[in-house]
Image (tube, rainbow, N blue to C red):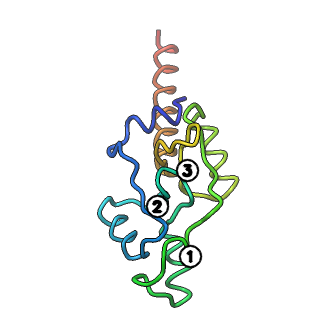
Amino acid sequence: MKTLQQLLDGKKYKEVISIAPHRPVFDALVVLAEYKIGALLVLEGEKLVGIFSERDYAREVILKGRSSKTTQISDVMTHNVICGKPDDTVEQALTLLTSKNFRHLPVVDNDKVLGILSLGDLAKETIDYQQRLIKKLESYINS
């Protein structure tokens, strides 16, 4: 099974898509829409200080009647972010996400943010892996 670094290497956007904590939520929504993604890493300089997702927006802005133009990311982001390591396997990452009920996993190496993977990224790779394994087994059986 692939590592998280291998999945990051195959992603469409190689750069780390992020936002600063002092920016308004509206700015984050624009970036989420532009890249068609569900979460943004919140970086202060190069340091990961949080993650902001569509769930955060729904729960902390909309349902609480806050304004997306005046509320800062730091007020509504998830602060204590659990991260994966580049040499973790997809299986390890899936186990972590499902046990913690998260949908996005930042990948960090020695405090350097390498990127972010979604539950969908991990599920797709798992399905691809299983299909490759089935083909190998069918080939073995038929030979």
Image coordinates for residue 123, horizontal then vertical, percent: 51, 45
Q: CA distance from mark 2 to mark 3?
A: 10 Å
- Res 105 label: 3
Residue 115: image location, x then y, percent: 46, 45
Of the residues under marks 2 and 3, which one precedes in the sequence? Answer: 2
Q: Residue furthest top?
A: 143
Tag 2 secondary structure? strand
Residue depicted at x 52% and y 42%: 112
* 25 relative to 121, above or below: below
The residue that appears at 38% across and 76% down in the rendered structure is 26
For marks 2 and 1 on the same chain, the one whose residue lies earlier in the sequence? 2
Residue shown at the point (45%, 60%) measured from the top left: 40
Q: Residues within 10 Å of mark 1 (few under 14, many from 20)?
A: some
Q: Is residue 29 above or below residue 126?
A: below
Closer to the camera in the image, 95 or 82: 82
- Amino acid at dot 2: Ala
In percent of the image, x 53 and y 54: which residue is there?
A: 104
The span from disc 3 to disc 1 (Cα, nearest Å) is 20 Å
Q: Which mark is residue 39?
A: 2
Q: Nearer the viewer, mark 3 or mark 1?
A: 1
User: Is disc 1 placed on a helix, strand or loop?
Assistant: helix
